[in-house]
Image (cartoon, rainbow, N blue to C red):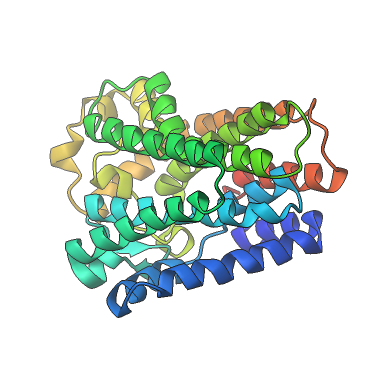
Amino acid sequence: MSAPAQLTAVLEAGGPELSRQLHRTEARLSEVAEGHGAELARHASGTLAAGGKRLRPVLVFLSGGAADGLLPAAVAVELLHMATLVHDDVLDQAALRRGRATVFAGGGRRAATATGDLLFSRAFAELAATGQEAAVSALSTASSALARGELMQRADAWSDHVPPERYLERCELKTASLFSEACRLGALLGEAGAGAEAALAGFGRRIGLAFQILDDVLDVSGPVERTGKQRGADLLDGTVTLPLIVARARDSELRAMDLRSLVTEPAQAAAVCDRIAMSGALGVAREEALHQVAEAKAALSGVELPERRRRALNLLADGVVERYA
């Protein structure tokens, strides 16, 4: 299922109210992006225009229902996500993000850093305005986890001694934490029943893990027109992912390669991607993602949810893996 088809199916299952909520989210994101001077507005608006599926706001709304207080949370989680993407592009010196020039490529390091800082600060301002201390705490938890995950990823760069367990821990910090806290925010501020917060947060965590694993699969298998970034970008910046970990365990020649010196340009990265794919590692990684999706669905089994929202959450979970097909 393509990304647009995935979102369309979730929106149809979620009903007209979910579409209205997302429309209001887009409007508020535009207000925030355009409200801080011409230069920052240009860069922030460009980041916003790059799009994305708005999965994190969708998780807020599907976890919380139709409550009026959900909009600040949905806007906050997307702003925090956007901020991390802009900062990641600075660290990676990335030229493309979702097929568009990055803020780093168009404005340089200082402009990108300032843009990311702006988006980050506005995320907390959105939630602080609600007066809900628990909500601000939830976003802070996700923010701290993102930073720790980034530091772990940098520490592991080019390493040939990263076990799968450490990789999953990094994914949990760098990606799954924000998915989890998006669901928690929906439960805190919305219409979730008693005891639903932990289960919904667990659902988000598992979906986030599956999402990151499949993102790493697509880095190996996906062409730039599909992924919006150069194939093998993780190899080029030294990021050790599950497909590489599994492929090294299966391929002694790949295990012996010094990737830091041998993979310095896109053509070399593509050749290593081909070797990873031939090892069967992508199938192993996809199976792990499917396991995480199954666990996510199981986490919802005891939660009282309207059938429409449950179906939309399950479709979202399935779509995370189906984008690989």
304 left or right, relative to 26: right
Residue in the picture at 37% in, 35% down: 144
Closer to us: 72 or 294:
72
Q: Position of residue 313 (x, y in %)?
A: 72, 44
Residue in the picture at 39% in, 72% down: 46
- Work out whether residue 202 can be spotted: yes
Displayed quadrant of residue 262: top left
Closer to us: 311 or 271:
311
Displayed quadrant of residue 274: top left
Q: Position of residue 14 (x, y in %)?
A: 78, 54
Q: Position of residue 141 (x, y in %)?
A: 45, 34
Q: Where 249 falls versus 225 (above or below)?
A: above
Which quarter of the image is occupied by the N terminus? bottom right
Q: Residue furthest bottom?
A: 38
Q: Where 315 falls versus 40 (above or below)?
A: above
Q: Position of residue 191 (x, y in %)?
A: 76, 43
